[in-house]
Amino acid sequence: MASMVDEILAQISPEDLAQRLDTDPDTAMDAVRKALPTLAGAMSGNVQAGRGEELGAAIQRDHDGSLLDNSQPLAAVDTTDGAKILEHVLGSRRGEVEQTLGSTSKADSSIFSRLLPMLTPLVMAWLGKRLGGGGATASQADSGGGLGDVLGDLTGGAAGGGLGGILGDLLGGEVNQSRSAMPDLGGLLDMLGGGSGPSQGSGKRDDDIPDVGDAF
């Protein structure tokens, strides 16, 4: 099965993205390859900090995956919404993340500051597709049928712990795959606290990240 990075990359026109970022296509796509795993790591860190149920509920409520059915998804992205999601996923660490990404890519931090709000809704849409397009519920996941069975097959493991556990499996798998493919992102992913694991971690909350609430 294709990774999140591969699936989203396949739907982005390098020329279109380069124009939006005022750079060349190679630099633009290199930035995307670094930004997508970072966003997965940030969301995985939220799950590990005990916010998986909130994130899962927000995805099911507002991100059914239809954005990725658009022939030009970047044109349909609401970057204002993307910025709000980033605020709750990264909190005060956003600037540090952009600076670190700039040091690992052909792109500089100013490109990442424009790129991350474009990509965040695409990641949420990808997760929305994996959560059944908003049609399944946390109770279905807990019951071990429906959504839980499907995502258990996708992730190769048990999808325990409701939506948080399912997202922990999905995002953790993406983060671990990215660690292997792009070792230069390892330090950044460590900082964000994402990784494998079907549970929601210790339940500790990271005070640098504002409460999710209804902002996703």
Image: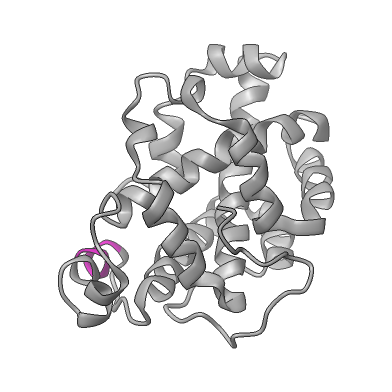
Q: Is residue 177 above or below residue 10?
A: below
Which of the pair 111/147 is nearer the observer?
A: 147
- Provide residue 5's location: percent of width, then percent of height: 47, 42
Which of the pair 170/163 is nearer the observer?
A: 163
Q: Is residue 167 above or below residue 98?
A: below
Q: Is residue 156 above or below residue 122?
A: below
Residue at left offset 32%, top offset 66%: 155
Query: In this figure, which colouring scheme has been used for the structure?
Result: one colour
Instruction: Looking at this view, name the residue that lies furthest to the front.
Output: 214
Q: Is residue 94 above or below residue 156?
A: above
In the image, is residue 52 part of the stretch drawn in magenta? no
- Provide residue 106's location: percent of width, then percent of height: 74, 29
- Provide residue 216's location: percent of width, then percent of height: 55, 52
Tell me the quarter of the picture where residue 33 sits. top right
Residue at left offset 31%, top offset 72%: 138
Q: Is residue 119 left or right of residue 147?
A: right
Q: Which residues are magenta?
A: 150-154
Which of the pair 140/176 is nearer the observer?
A: 140
Q: Main secondary structure of the magenta part?
A: helix
